[in-house]
Amino acid sequence: MTSTLTDRPRTAAPRDERRRRAGPVPAAPVRARRLASEQLAVAGGQLGAGLGNLVFATIAARVLAPGEFAQLAAFLALYLLIHVPAGSLSAGSALSPALAARARRRVLAVGVGVGAVLALLAVPLAGVLQLPAGLLLAAAASGPTAGLLALDRGRLYGLARLPRAVGSLLAEPLVRLTLGIALALVAGPLGAAIAVVVAGWVALAIARLDATGPVAAAPPAGAGATATVTVAFLLLAALQNLDVLLANAVLAGEEAGRFAVLSTFGGAAAFATTTVPLMLLGRRGDRRALHVAVGVAAGLGLAAVAVVAIDPGALVGAAFGERYAAVGGLAVPYLLAMALLGVARVLVAHACASGARTGVLVVLGAGAALQAALVLGAGDAGDVAHATLAATALVTAGAGVLALPRRPALADLAALARRQDVAAVAALTVAGLVVRLLSSRGIWLDEATSIWQAQMPLGELLETLRTVDVHPPLHHLVLWVTVRVAGTGELAVRLPSLLAATALVPVLYAAGRDIYDRRAGLVAAALGTVAPFAVWYAQEARMYALFMLLALLVTWLQVRIMRDGRRRDWAAYTVAAAALVATQYLGLFLIAVQQVAFLAALRHDRRGLRDWLVATAALALLLAPVLAFGQAQFAANEAAGKGFQQVPSQTGGDVAEAGGRPGPYAVLTNVVWAVLGYHGDATMTSLVALWPLLMLLVLALLGRGRSRRTLAIVLAAGVPAVALFALGQLKPFVFEVRYFIGAVPLVLLLVARAATSWSPRRLTQVAVAGIATALLAAGLADQQLNGDNPRVYDFRGALRETAERARPGDVIVYTPAYLNHVVAYYAEGVEARPLGEEPPRPERGGRVFVLASFLDKPQYRDAAAEAVRALDRRHELVDESRYPQIRVWEFER
Amino acid sequence: MTTDIRLQRPAWTAAGRSRRVRVAARLLLVALVPLALFYFGWLLAPERIGQPVLYGLLVAAELFNLAQAIGFWWTCAGERQRRRRVADGPPPAVDVFVPVYDEPAAIVEPTVAAATALRGADVRVWVLDDGHSDTIRALAERHGASYLRRTPREGAKAGNINHALAHADAPYLLVLDCDHVPAPGFLEATLGELEDERVAFVQTPQYYANAGSGEVPAAAWSQQALFFGPIARGKDGHGAMFCCGTNVLFRRAALDAVGGFPADSVTEDFELSIRLHERGWRSRYVPEVLAAGLGPEDMASYVSQQQRWSRGCLGALGAVRRSRLPLRLKLQYALSASYFLSGWTVLIYMSFPVVRILTGAQPLAATTADQFLVHFAPYFGMALLALTWLGGGTYTFKAFALQAASFWIHVQSSVLVLLRRRGRFVVTPKEGVHERQPRAVAPALVLLGVLVGAAVYGLLRDQDPATLNNVAFAALHVCVLLAGVLPALRSAPVATPLARPREAVPA
């Protein structure tokens, strides 16, 4: 008989033992807010450390004699030379704290060795570097701390031991400021240097105080990944400093000095984001942490850019002296490069942790090679700055691709389809970008005015807009930043419009897919790729492309809100709607339609009432300054006797008479423009004659049923246009397709929906979508290639050729007078003035170029004819040139 | 186990939003009248006359359509909310007639079976077999229904019913086409209406259960849904609902008073209604799907059906004109009958671009496209809006296209009626064929060819805006015609009345 005692099963293992055998508990998902606060806390510590060190250097410069301060600066450079390369170890230990612990002895040995070598060579090096040997011995004493400090700080980042990490960061400047200044007063630069070394040891000690086990850790990374991330961060450090090293070699002395100042300035943006990727490494595998890290890095970098962009010349001048103030023009692009570097570091860290080792090294190597190649061919500091910008952009883009989610489950058909969609949409987006880039044309009047405005200081810009312009300021502010980053070249000033118009393609896909289905999304994206209007306004430095994008976004968000009622959609809608109105006041029509739709929906379901009230209040708050600005503009224009009168507009010829009240034919004309783009008068007349086909479209709507989402889009597209048509009966110029251009992407969405849903047959759907896309492509081709397009004004051709032929003493007289900005843009350096009452009289040997446009208007036609007659009486007509909508006469005495 | 699709729950309701529709109809009328006056005021100006004959045709067509449009609105505005009446007292005797003429047993049997299961009355089902089929006889016997044959087989369906009336004696008579399967509660929902002694018949909707099985039945059903929805409800409000031949419950005494079904018309139901209303009898319409049938499965069936209806209704115009109906009822009947003249307007509109391209002649003069659009577009838009709103969205483009492509049927019927040629009652086939049927749409194809040829000729000769405008009109007509005839040009799978597991049709 068996005793129950003996038969009792073995006792279970103690709970701790069971947990140990189970392995590390995976970390629970962390909320984005906490991730962001962690990042910002450590970045704050980093910034504090940098600021503290800067204050230390500033105070030291005051308390030490110039020669002594120069010695201290040299010591600090040597200190950095030892510590910066070692800093890459932080990345490895952040990724794998356990491996870092095992590498301590080796790192210590290396550090001791470096210190020993430096100590042994202190005397001869002192002679070479013209430094006291004591400073070199002090630098040698910092050798062991370099690697260890990097390892331990990295471990703290990886384990999210924030207080220790921040404490270690702040300890250095604190010790420097206290002990360092005191010793500097007593022992000069050697005392300050000793304090710097002691600060390093103190920081190390604080970092080493953490003795407890991990709070939460991602699964340990392998040695290979650790080594890769270490090497990658070394390459990133090289990328950061390669430009200044090479610039010193290739540029002349003064130019090299200018770049050195720029590099020092730019280092601030890179410095601010140093800890962000290191914090991310401890949370690898968490895509939310990646998003937060990218956001924090981008935010900090762009904040630095924004601060500097206020008045870069003044900032640089204040920091480095007035003789370097001119470098301020390059500060924004260079800081942008450093901001990109900060983002790139985050993406590289993620890519390394995800296993994309080879890719990372290839991208970084390519970036460094590109930077080196461009810098070696540089002629001035600006070239070097742009070279760095190009290299960091390349590295950021490459790292971004590597950071994309990889290897979705092939068994998941939806994921497979989505991956195919992503490839298709990416291809369409690239194609759309290429189409837009190839569709360039010369700067138009309004653009020239905007470019002139954007080059003003910020305050002057806003005042000018307030007193003489009629548009809200958002696009102007974007352009203001753009010209400071990229200059005033044609491509540069059109970059915001180009990007907005290209972004229409993926956003059309996303909206179409979300609102309807993936087929509708793909067709909408295809239509957006070749939509003539989207291409036309991609190449115009005005607000229209941005307006289209924002109109699409707010409408999409409106549909999402009416469908799901999520708060984040409300928040996004509020921001987008405010941006829409801040881009073009007429966006208020669209917002008003949407508010009515929200209210109508709330009548049946009150659950979203609170969210609507909050969102509307927030929108009102955001719009208040914009509308106040608009009110001020209106008042200023009224006081000047202008009112919101018609600005010079491109006309469609006789088809839609500008100035007459809009009628049905004007409606048809604008519809043709919106869908098929701008064309010559003959083409427009022919297209408008096909209006009976619209009856077919109306008939085809019979029995389609009612869909709230489609109705919302139809109303969003149509009501503003109808409102402007009604308003146009009083003020004819407002009924112009540019002012309800927000309808264009919505129409594309509706066409895509119709093409993919009106027939159940797949073949019919493909055929209809193909025909629609082909029609738009044909319209685009005619718009861009047909020389009869009355919207093409070749100021570029006319003025560039005139400027090339002009000699000193020549003068350009132009009519109408408002060509002033476009003349200044293309004929900078040539004397130019508007045609006045007196005929122009060139100096002896000088020539007069009469440039005239808008000759369809009698006053300008007559003025030009009169001037030409007057000149013809006393001068010889040398040449007469015709350009699209432009004529130029050249007279010689 | 699969069951007949006619036994499934109907996917449509005939009930309307009475008050909202009335209000909407009145508002639309208020909006339309000034727009119509605006358009016709412009159209009828003397300086508008281009080529006189073409102008006259245009004006005639526009006035006809205006009359139809106003009639449509007037009819729909008459919709009233009726309280459903439930029959009191013991269940009365009801004869159920199911006329059959060579339809397949699979089509007939569910109808007979369901008829024998009708609740609320003492039902006697009669299968009236003009096909003299033993299979049908056996089917009737299987379900306990009476079976009748007759010789000679004169008068088509009307004669068949009249012959059966001599054998039946119940006070009420339900007529069901052999493909219309009644719901068990059919009589419960309709007998109450006959408690008013003045009511001669109660009509219910003809629902096509096979509407989803092909393009032709879908388009045909869309047309039916417009009629049995807002139009029938409106006619009921005007007291002008007419008998539609099936799914109708009669008071036997009323039938006897007018001598039974008129056997000299291919639309015996329409003529019967006129006679009944002439004698002061009343009609009712119950907007509830109480029986499910089969619509024409293919183009040939549809054409056959439309030819019978148009011949019959146009042929009844004379009777309407001569009748002693109250004016309101007379207008209602005239509207319904004259609908089958609308094919002429389609022909007229479609001929204008051809004539313009070939000869340069056009109906209008001294006008620009801008002026035309200013006057015409609001009127056109409002008319479509009324159709969509009042029709509840049931009328589809395909239905419109099919109607347009069937224009020649109206033209043909008009000519035959004028020539006093007697029509022949042809039973609408209940099963479709899956072959192409170009002959069924030959006239429409001819017009298509003429339009395409004229358009191509015009483009080759000239590309000025006027030519392009007419080519666009031609293209518009081509697209509409093509959409209407396409089902006949495609081979389609045959839809069988087979479907999902049994699901009873609710009362």
Image (tube, coloured by chain):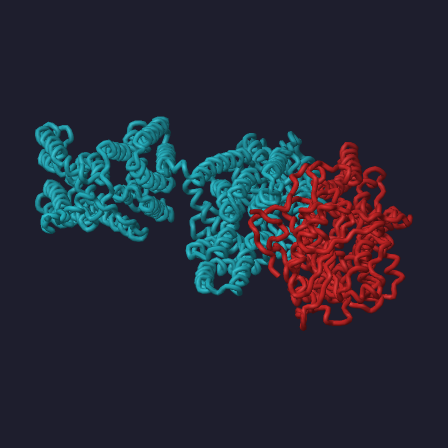
| Residue nearer the viewer, A845 or B411 | B411
Q: Nearer the viewer, residue A758 or A13?
A: A13
> Number of labelled discs?
0
Task: Give above or below for A746 relative to A890.
Answer: below
The colour one sees for chain A in the rendered image is cyan
A276 sits to left or right of A821: left
Q: Quadrant of residue A265?
A: top left
**Residue found 81% across the figure and 55% down from its top:** B158
Q: Quadrant of residue A851?
A: top right
Where's residue B221, x and y in %?
Answer: 68, 51
Q: For the C terminus of chain A, give its image quadrant.
A: top right
Asked if one can make out residue A685 in the rendered structure from this viewpoint, the answer is no
Residue A466 showing in the rendered view: yes
Residue at image coords 33%, 39%: A347
Residue A737, percent from left and from top: 61, 48
Q: Is residue A441 left or right of residue A128?
A: right
Residue A186 spot, x, y in % from top left? 8, 46
Q: Taking B99 as reference, is A518 left or right? A: left
Q: Is residue B227 above or below residue A480?
A: below
Vertical placement of residue B386 versus B152, above or below: below
Q: Is residue B257 above or below residue A357?
A: below
Chain B colour in the picture: red
Hey, which quadrant is residue A730 in on the image?
Answer: bottom right
Q: Nearer the viewer, residue A498 or A71?
A: A498
The residue lying toward the viewer, choosing from B94 and B299, is B94
Q: Position of residue B369 (x, y in %)?
A: 76, 48
Q: Residue furthest right?
A: B419
Q: Is residue A530 left or right of residue A666?
A: left
